[in-house]
Image: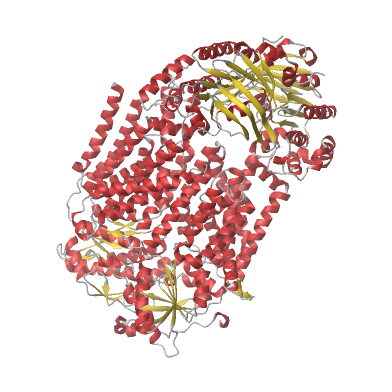
Amino acid sequence: MKKKWLVILFSLFVVCAVFVIPSMLPAAKKAPETIKVSAVLSLTGPFAPLATQAKNAYQIYFEKVNAEGGIFIKEFNKKIPVEIKILDDESDGLKTILQLEVANEWGAVANLGGIGCTSFEVGTVVAQKNKMVWLGPGCAGWTPHQRGINYMFSTFFKTPFISPLVYNMIMSMPEPRPKKVAIFEINQLDCEEAVEYWRKGAEKKGFEIVYHQKYALGTKDFSAMITGAKAAGAEILLGYPAPPEGPAMIKQMKELDYNPKLIYWIRAPEASSFGPALGPLADYVCVPVAWSNQLAISGNDQLNAQHQKVHGKLGDPITGSAYAAGQVLVDAVKRAGILDRKAIRDTIAKTDTETVAGRIHFSPQGWAVDRLVLVLQWKDGKQNIVYYNEAGQNYKKNIPKVDLKWQPPWSSR
Amino acid sequence: MMLEMDSLSKSFGGLMAINHLDLDVYKGEILGFIGPNGSGKTTLFNLISGLLKPDSGKIKLNGIDITPLSSHKICQMGIARTFQLTKPFAQMTSLENVMVGKAFGCTPTWSMREAKEEAEKILRFIGLGEKSMWRASALGVVDRKKLETARALATKPKLLLLDEMMAGLTPTEVEEAMVLVKKIRDSGITLIVVEHVMEAILGISDRVVAINAGEKIAEGAPQDVVRERKVIEAYLGEEA
Amino acid sequence: MLEVNHIDTYYGELKALWDVSLTLDKGEIVALIGANGSGKSTLLEAIAGLLPPTTGEILFEGVRLDKEPSHRIVEFGVCLVPEDRGIFPGMNVSENLELGAFSKRGRKEKEETLHVVYGLFPILKNRRNQLTRTLSGGEQQMLAIGKGLLSRPKLLMLDEPSLGLAPLVTKNIFEAICQINQTGVSILLVEQNVHIALRVAKRAYIIENGRIVQHEQAKNLLRDRRVIQAYLGTHYA
Amino acid sequence: MPKNWKSFFIFGGIIALLAMLPLFTNRSDVLTWSCLTLQYILLSQSWNIIGGYAGQVNLGHAAFFGLGALTTRYLWLAGLPFPASLLSGAFIATVFALLIGIPAFRLRGIYFVIGTLVLAEILKVVIDTRFPVASVLPVETLLTYSLLPRYYLSLMGAVLSVIAVYFISRSRLGLGMMAIREDEDAARTSGVNILQNKLIAFAISTFLAGLAGGIFAFYMVAIQPGYVFSPIWTFDSVVIVFVGGIGTLIGPIIGSVFFVLLKQWLSLHLPGGLHLAVFGVLFILVVLYMPDGFIEAIRRYGKMVTLGRKPMVQGG
Amino acid sequence: MVQFLAQTFVNGINVGALYGLAAVGLSLIFGVMRILNVAHGEFLMVGGYIGFWLFKLYGVDPFVGLPLVGIFLFLIGIVFYKVVFSRVAKFHEEVKLKNSLLIAFGLYLIFPQIAMVLWTADERAISPAYSGQAFDLLGVRFGYVPLAGVCIAIIVILAMYLFLTKTYFGKSLRGTAESWKAAKLSGIHIEWTFMITFGLGISLAGIAGVLIALTQELTPFMGMPWTLKALIVVVLAGMGSIVGAFVAGLILGIVEAVSAIFMGPYTIAIGLLIFLIILVLRPQGLFGRA
C-alpha cells in the first residue's frame, strides 16, 4: 500500500518538474523582435475598477505606438514594436509579487503599474529588488516614496500637494468663505497622510477643524459621522472615501439634511461612474484629479476619441495618468537607445516631457514634481474643472475652467 | 462491592428515565440487566460512564464518588462501555480503534508499539485479528460490535458495560459471544450486560436486575427473575 | 393487496434483509415480530420507499412500488408511521396533521379525515395549537397515527406504536388501531408488545436476522414457544 | 522495516531533488512559484491538523497566520535575529490560540466554524486600522535580497509540516485527535480527554500556522499588515485540504500543487479575470466529481485496480 | 440628546433591515436544505445589477422592478440548484455541508468575473429622482428610500412568514426543515421542495441586492463582504430561524450605529465582538433552540 503513495508522490513531483523544466530551458539570446513591457494590474478583486482604467490607457497608447512602427532604438537603428504583457494580480499583494517575478523572467524592460497603495507599496519593492522600473499612476501616498527606492516612478499626485489645495481653492473665492472643516478619515495609509496635511494646512490658513472621525473600510452606515459633522456646524467636508462608499455617503447626507458648502473628496467622486450612479445628487461634489478628459492638451483628443470608440465613454481620470506613464516610458526608452533596465531607469529619472497630463519630471524619490492637479466639480452629470494648482498656470489656455460653486442646501435644489 | 448507585434519578423534559434507582454491582460478577425498550437501560449506562449527569443521586466506584467526574476520567478509573448503536471511529482501522482504548484508557501509554501489540492481542482475542487493517466503516454489524468490545477491553477496565452486544447475532454467534463474555469475566473484569437476547443473558448472568420505566422491578437469580409476572408483563404486555 | 416478493435490502455495504417475502390482504392486521435489529423496521422502510430494495419486487394492488419514490408511494395509499414517529417537533399539532394530508389523495378529504382523527383522539383537538415537542409520549404517538391517517391510507404501517408508553396509554392506542382497522384500513404492525400485537393481528410473521423464519395465524403463535423464545430466549419455560 | 526504508528513501530523494532545484534554475518566477507552493503546503498542513485530523473546522486560521507573520516581521526588522523572531511569531500565535481555545471549543458545528471566522475578521479590522502602512524591507536589505534562503526556508517549513503530520498521525496524540473527529462520545468513554486533546491539536496547528506566517513575512519584500489577516488565507488552506483529501498526509501536498500552479498557469494563459472564472469552474467540477478530494479518487481508482487481490484493506 | 439617540436608532434600523433581508435567504436555504451557500452575496450582487439594468435601460422604477428581479433571481436559483446544488443535496449531512461550501466558493470565483464582463468594473448605483429625500418627524430624519427599504424588508419577511406558516406549501418547507424523513413519509416531494426553497432564497438575495443598490453601491466584488455579514446575522439569530434572522439583522445594525458614535473605525469589530460574546454565552444563537 505504501508503494502506491510513493508512486503518487513521485508522479506529483514529475508533474511539478514538467511545469518547471520547460521554463528552465535557456532563453536564447537573439535580436529582440519586440520591446517587452509588462503591466501587472489588479484586473480582478476590489481594485479592479481603477486598474481597468489603467489597462485601457496602456492598450490604447501602445496600439498607437505600434501603429507608428514602435519605438526607435538607436542600438539597433530601427523601430521596434512594443509587446505588452498584462498580468493580473487579483488585488492581492502576494500575487503582485508572483506576477512581477513572471514579468522579470519574461524579460520585460520595465513594468507599468496600476493604481492603489497596496499594489504600489508591494510592487515597487519587488521592482527595486529585481532592478526593473515600476512606472505608473501608483497612489497618492507620500510614505512609499520615503523609503529610498529608486526604481519606482509615480505619475500621480501626492497627498502633501492635493490636501492643502482645497484651502487655496477656498481662499481664491470671494468672501464670505466657509471656515469650519469636518474630516471623515478612512483607515487607510493615504488618507491618514492626507488628514495630516489637512490639519497642518488648516492651521496655516486659518481654518478650523470642528469635527474629525475615523472609520473602517467596509462601513455601510455613515450617519453617525454625518450627524456629528452636522451638529458641529461644519461647512467644508473633507474625506477620502473608497469608491463604493461615495453614493451611500451622499444619499445619507441628503437624508439627514446635512448641508456643507463644499464637499472635497479625494478618490470616490473621480470615477466617471460617480455622477451617473448618483444622478443630480452628485452635483457640487469636488474632487482633485491628476487628469481630466476635458484637458485640451495635445494627445487627449486622440485618447478620448479612441477611448470613446472602444469603451463607449471618454477617459477616466486614472486613464490619463496611466497614459502619461506610457508616454514617459516610450520617451525614456527612446532616449536610452538601448534595451537595458538600468539605462531605462536612468533616463526615466531624467524625464522632462510633455504628456497628456501635462509636463512630467520626477523627484529623486520618484514622484512627479510640479504635477498638474485639477479640481473637478460635478454638475449635471459632468465634471467641470473649477480649480488648478500653480503647475496649471502654464496650461491656462488648455484648461476649460468654470467657477466653483458653493453647494446650495438640499432643500433648495 | 464494586459499584454502588444510590437513589439515582434522571429525567428528560418531565419524563423520568431513571427513577430513584439503587443498584449494587459486586466484584467479579456478571450482572444481567434487562427491561423492555425505553425502560432506561441505556440512560443508566450513560450515567455510569459520565456522558450524562444525574439529576440526583450518587455513583460510587470502590467507594469513590465518580458522579462529578468527566467521562474520560471515569474511563481511566476503570469503567469501560460499549454502545448499543455502535460508535466505531469509522475512518480509522480496527487496529487504530482498539489502540485508542489502550493508549488513553486505564493504563495509558505513549508508546505506539506497546499500544499496537496490545491492540493486536485483543483483536485476536475477540476474533478480529484478520481484519485489523480494515477500516471500521467497512466492518459489518457483528464485527462492529466485536470492535466496540475490543476497544472497551483495551482500556483495561475493572468494570465493563456491554450494551446489547448480541442483538442481531445468529444463534451460533450468540453462543460465541457468551463464551467470550465468560472469558472476559474470567480475566478478572466485572461486567454489566444489557441484553435483549434473553437466552444469552440468562445463560451468562450471575445475577439479573430487571427495570421498567426507570424503576427496578425485579432482582435475583436469572431463572427466578424471568419467571416473575412483572417481568413477563413488562416484556410481553399484560395478559388479559 | 400487498405483496412483497423476495426482496434484499442493503444499508450501504451491509445487507439488512435477505430474500424477504410477505403478503397482506385487504382489511387485515398483520404483525411483524422479531428481536431488536432483526430487520422489522427495515422491511417497513423498504415498503415505504425510504430504503428501496436492491432485488425483488413490492406490489401494492398490483402496482409495483419498489421503483417509486416515497412521496409517490404515499399517493398510492401506503403510509408508514416510523419508530421515531415521523412528526415535526417544531410545528404545532394541527400543522402536523395538515402536513399529514399533504398528498393529493389526503388533501381531497382532509376535513372529513380530520374530523375522524379528532374523534379518535379527542386530546389532539384540545392540543391543536400546542408545539408537538411539548406533547407527552402518548400524545405524540396519537398524533403520529393521526397524521398517518390524514394521508387516507389503504395500508397503514405502524412501527412500534407502544414504544416507551405506559400500559394504559398503549391500550388506548391499540383500541384506536382496531377502530382504524374496522374502517377498512389494512394494518402492518411492528410491535414489541407481543401479546397485544398478536391479540389484534390476524396473522404474524417472525423475522430473525433479516429473514422471515415463520408465518402463522396469530392465535396459534400466541401459544407458540418460538415467540417467547424470540424475546425471552430458550431458557424460558 | 524494509517498507519504511523504501518510503523514507523516496521521500528523502524528493526532498533532495527539491533542494537541488536552485542548481537547475535560477529563474526567479520558478523559485517564486515553488516558494509559494511550499508555503501553501506548510499552511494547509497546519490546517489539516486541526481541521482534518481533529475534525474542528476552524475558519479563523488567518488570525494565527497573521499573528505569526506580523510578530516575526516586526521583531526581525527591529533587529532580533531571524530564527528567534520566527519562533516568537509562532509562539505568539500559539499563545493566542490557547487563550481563545477554551471558549471557542464550547461552540459546536457550524457555530464553531462561523465563530472562528469572525474572530479573524475582528483582528483584521483592528490591525487594518492600527497599522495602515506597509512594512517594507529597507533598501539595503533589498540589495542583498535573495530568493534562495527563502526557498530553502519554505522547503524546510513544508518538510517540517509533513513530518509533523506524519508523526502526529502515528502518535498517541493523533490517535486521540482522530477519535475525537470520528465520535466524541466514544472517544470520551475510551478515556480521551477531549478538551485537552483539542487544545494540543490547536496549539500545534497554530504553531505551524504562525511559522507559515513567519516564513511568509521573511519572504515578502513588503507586507500590508492587515493583508496577512485576510480570510483568503483561511479559505485557500481549507480549499487546498478539501480538494487534496482531508485528514491525509499527501492530500494537502497535491492540493497545494493544484491550487497554486494550476491557478498560476491559467492566469498566464488566459486573458485577465477569466482565469479565476475558469479555475472556479474546474474547482466546482472537482468538488462534484471527487467529493472526497483527489486522494479518495486515487484511492478508489487504486481499489478498482487491486480489487481482485485485497479489496477492503486500507493502508494506514 | 434624545433626538440624537433616536436618529442613531433609525439609522441603525435602516442598515439593519438590509442586513436582515440579506440574511433571510441564506437562513431559509440552510434551514431547509442544510446547504451553506457562501455565494449568497454573489446572487445579491446579480440582483442589484438586474435592478440597475431595469432602471438604466428601461427606466423601470426600482421598486416596481423589485418583483421582476425577485422572479428572475428565483429562476436563476432554480437553474443553479438543478445544475450544481442538486448533486450535493443528496449527500450525507456533513459531506453536504462541506461540499456545498466548496461549490459556493467556486461560484464566488466565477460570479465577479462574469459581472465585470456584463456590467464593467465601474461602480454603479440606482438613484431615482427621489433618492436622498427625507422628512422630519420630531427632529428625526427619515429618508424615503431607506424607509421604503425597511418597509419592503418587513413586508417580504412578513410575506415569507405567512407563506411558511399559513400556506400548505410553506408548511411543507418547514416540515422538510424539521425532518426530511417525516416529510417524505407525508408525501412531500423533497427534490421539488429543495428546488423551490433554493429559488426563494436566491430571490430574497436578489431583492436585498436591489435595495442595497438603492442605498449603497454595486460593484462586481461586493459579494463576499455581504455574504460574511449575512452569515454572521444568520448565526446570531440561530441557524434557520427566518424572522429571527431579520431581527438579528436589525440588532446588528443598531449596535453598529450606536458604537459608531464612540468607536469610530472599530465599529465593525465591536459588532463582531458582541456577536462572538453572544455566541459563547448562547451557542445556539439568539433565537435558536438549545
In the image shown, does E9 or A340 lie closer to the viewer? E9
Residue at image point 51% right, 77% down: A230
Counting from the top left corner in percent of width and height, residue C211 is at: 64, 16
Viewer can see residue D108: yes
Work out which residue is located at the far front of the displayed protein and give it: B63
State which quarter of the image contains the C terminus of chain C. Answer: top right
Q: Quadrant of residue B232?
A: top right
In the image shown, does D17 or D173 lie closer to the viewer? D173
State which quarter of the image contains the N terminus of chain C. Answer: top right
Residue at image point 68% right, 56% down: E159
Counting from the top left corner in percent of width and height, residue D115 is at: 49, 49
* Above or below C97: residue B108: above
Left or right of residue A203, residue E68 in this image? right
Counting from the top left corner in percent of width and height, residue C161 is at: 73, 28
Work out which residue is located at the far left of the displayed protein and give it: A75
Viewer can see residue A290: no
Counting from the top left corner in percent of width and height, residue A88 is at: 35, 56
